[in-house]
Image: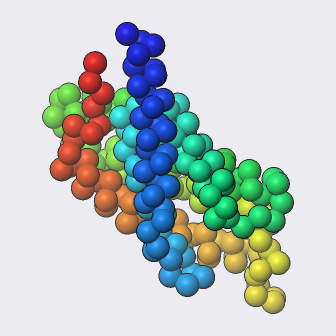
Amino acid sequence: MAQRQQLLGMIEAALMAVLAFVFALIPLDVGNIFEIELGMIPIMIFSFRRGPKLGILAGFLWGILKLVSGDIVVLSFLQVFVEYVFAFAVTGLAGFGARTIQQKLAQKESLYGTIAWSVALAVFVKYFIHFIAGVVYWSSYAPDGMNIYWYSFLVNGSSALATLIVDGLIVALICRAAPHLLRVKE
């Protein structure tokens, strides 16, 4: 039975990666100021259901899909790995709240606090990686005379904040409307 659940979890991870890829195609960019990453939503909900290991796998697969789609900006091999594989994979860190969410579901307690910190963790780590990449790889795009750390913080911080607000609200609404999506049937 455990092998069957593990296989089902991996199949779900692949499906959530595809769903994340499709969600990410919805354009929510505001010029060069910030973007809202809707693709994180299915990965985070899946991570609440299956935990961080399979959540990270789903995020990794999402990054690979993004990579093979060709819809990326390539500055170097390492930049591509950091921004399109590693940063996407850490979305699954939201799964660190999975055990608490499962317990609260069973006891019919409020999930919102756990959802809030879990979403915040995933968004913060993903955009911190993008911040570092911004300093290392994108510094030449900063306006003349602007501090590269400040530039990367403004670009990635605004995206992180917008993504945190929008994705956090959508994830909370989905979890409230359809809590059965968070449970694994045995």
Quadrant in the picture for the N terminus: top left
Tell whether 141 sits left or right of 37. Answer: right
Q: Nearer the viewer, residue 157 or 52?
A: 52
Q: Is 82 above or below relative to 50?
A: below
Q: Nearer the viewer, residue 147 or 138?
A: 138
Residue extending farthest top: 1
Residue at 63% in and 48% down: 64
Quadrant in the picture for the C terminus: top left
Residue 2, given in percent of the width and then of the height, sits at 41, 12
Q: How many marks?
A: 0
Q: Nearer the viewer, residue 141 or 8?
A: 8
Residue 113, given in percent of the width and then of the height, sits at 31, 47
Residue 31, given in percent of the width and then of the height, sits at 55, 84
Q: Is 112 above or below relative to 9?
A: below
Tell whether 167 sits left or right of 55. Answer: left
Tell whether 177 sits left or right of 123. Answer: left
**Residue 116 seen by the camera:** yes
**Residue 51 seen by the camera:** no
Residue at 26% in and 52% down: 174
Residue extending farthest front: 69
Residue 59, given in percent of the width and then of the height, sits at 54, 45
Residue at 36% in and 51% down: 116
Residue at 44% in and 41% down: 15
Tell whether 99 sits left or right of 35. Answer: left
Q: Nearer the viewer, residue 91 or 149?
A: 91
